[in-house]
Image (cartoon, rainbow, N blue to C red):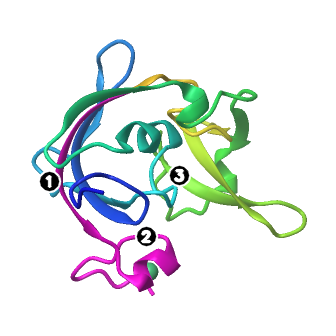
Amino acid sequence: MSDTTITTGKVVFFHYTLTNDTGEVIDSSRGRDPMPYLHGASNIVPGLEKQLEGKALGAKLVAVVAPEEGYGLRQGDPMPVPKDQFPDEMEIMPGMQFFGEDPEGRKFPLWIAKVEDEQVLVDLNHPLAGVTLNFDVEVMSMRDASDEEKEHGHPHLPGMHHH
Ligand code: ZN
């Protein structure tokens, strides 16, 4: 097996530009450091991870990822929440993620869909749910993951203090 092929247990660094179906750029790593991830550990959306499998160092590809293998299909509509339910100091902006808590105390992610005068529309769907993702990718570098990285299921980078 080549040492410069993406397989489970590799830490991979890649550049990407993400566009939606209408060609609108949603996000890009260009101008920043390449994005690191641990292959086989579900650090990135399943459809992209699948299409990176077996790719070589330097590979360029456009990975088209259906919602089912991206951020999922949309379920339900945004719900209105009165603005005064949010803390005063919280600056509420569309696209912002926060966490709600169900009656059993389990946390779940929510996103701000829209901010109106008296209320905020809150969505259980990721902003990219239901969107076909087009990743324009370039594989910049890769290395074998350490045992600790494999155990944790994510890459460890210099200057990263998350433990
Ligand atoms: Zn870790």
What residue is drawn where x is 57% and y is 40%?
126
Q: Position of residue 98 (x, y in %)?
A: 58, 57
Residue type at the position of mark 2: His
- Determine whether, in the image, residue 42 is placed left or right of residue 135: right
The verdict on residue 159 being magenta is: yes
> What's drawn in magenta, residue-wise?
134-163
- Determine whether, in the image, residue 40 is placed left or right of residue 18: right
What residue is drawn where x is 18% and y is 39%?
59
Q: Position of residue 9 (x, y in %)?
A: 41, 66
Which residue is denoted by mark 3 in the rendering? 97
Which residue is denoted by mark 1 in the rendering? 32
Name the residue furthest right. 103
Which quadrant does ligand 1 occupy?
A: bottom left
Q: Earlier in the sequence, mark 3 or mark 2?
A: 3
The reply to whether the C-beta atoms of the residues labelled 3 and 1 are less than 8 Å apart is no
Nearest-to-viewer mark from 3 and 2: 2
What residue is drawn where x is 56% and y is 37%?
71
Queried on whether the Cβ of the residue with tag 1 lies below 8 angstroms from ligand 1, the answer reads no
Q: Note whether 77 is above or below 123 in the view shown.
A: above
* Crowding at mark 1 (Cα within 10 Å: few <14, some 14-19, many 20+): few
